[in-house]
Image (cartoon, rainbow, N blue to C red):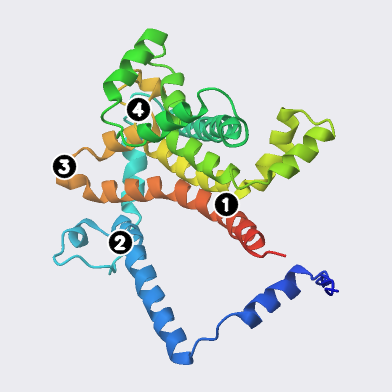
Amino acid sequence: MEKSKTAVKKPHLSLKERWKYRKKNELNRSMGGNIVVFLLLALLGAFMALPVVYSIVQAFKPMEEIFIFPPRFTVQNPTGKNFKLIGQLADNLWVPFSRYLFNSVFVSFAGTLGNVLISSMAAYPLAKHDFPGKKVLFQLVTISLLFTGGVIELPRYIVMAKLHIINTYWALILPAVASSMGLFLMKQFMEQLSNSLLEAARMDGMTEFKIFIKIVMPLVKPAWLTQIIFAFQGVWSMTGGNYIYKESLKLFPTALAQIQSGGISRAGVAAAAALIMLIPPVIMFLVTQSSIMETMAHAGIKE
């Protein structure tokens, strides 16, 4: 008679105990190897941080230090005159400076929210349902990733003109909402979800919308948090000059471009404006980074 193999069940371990168990069973690396890896990562991190550091330093340089060659990553006499000059020049704009800021904040949040919702809702049936034309639709999405923004500018303008949304907020929000990259990212991530979990929810009487909201979206949190970062960055930095001609609807980057369009004499203002444009995406990344890292850490530790 063959001996029946009894399955030995592992005791339930807490997250902390599982992490210690995982670290204990990882291959040990020598001290020299750890030092080499640390130095390489430090050099890579420093190289990637140089542009950000240079932008910050340039914004606080007086005019006589901006054009020093070779460029310096330090400032000898820091000044806030560049930011003060932005405020003075903003008073000469056609509409209040706060109006440009409101337009960018409104469009950025509306475009980012719509991007995440529409991409997620479109990705769910492509990832977890079968219907005629599914493969063709996804191939069209994939092909659209090959086209840059400049290629579709003219067709996009024609579509917006036919819809009569030129010189409206919709001309800025709709292109941000229709993101092929966001749809592709969400679809690829949702395919990893367990089909048995979704079937169990359907057997319990949950509708597809409830399954999407209460099960799918929480499980794909890393994907839509990552998408928020890229979507907000893209919308915040756009000018919308091809679709917006009313001064009261123009965005914050357009106002800053008008302020700094004074030649070499406004090089300091241009540096300060670039730093101001950099702050909101960095804040958005810092706010969502902890959630992304925490979710990835939990997803990476398996039972």
Who comes first in sequence, dot 2 or dot 1? 2
* Distance from Cα at disc 2 to Cα at disc 4: 27 Å
Who comes first in sequence, dot 3 or dot 1? 3
Residue 233 lies, with reference to residue 156, above or below; the image says below
Residue shown at the point (48%, 39%) measured from the top left: 184
196 vs 89, nearest the viewer: 196
Which of labels 4 and 1 is toward the front?
Answer: 1
59 vs 105, nearest the viewer: 105
Disc 3 target residue: 263
Who comes first in sequence, dot 4 or dot 3? 4
Residue 280 lies, with reference to residue 6, above or below; the image says above
Which of labels 3 and 2 is toward the front?
Answer: 2
The amino acid beneath tag 4 is: Gly
The amino acid beneath tag 1 is: Thr
The amino acid beneath tag 3 is: Gly
* Distance from Cα at disc 3 to Cα at disc 1: 38 Å
Secondary structure type for disc 1: helix
Disc 2 target residue: 54
Is residue 14 found left or right of 259 in the rendered image? right
228 vs 246, nearest the viewer: 228
Disc 1 target residue: 288
CB of mark 2 within 8 Å of CB of mark 4?
no
Is residue 155 found left or right of 181 in the rendered image? left
Q: Quadrant of the C terminus?
A: bottom right
Disc 4 target residue: 240
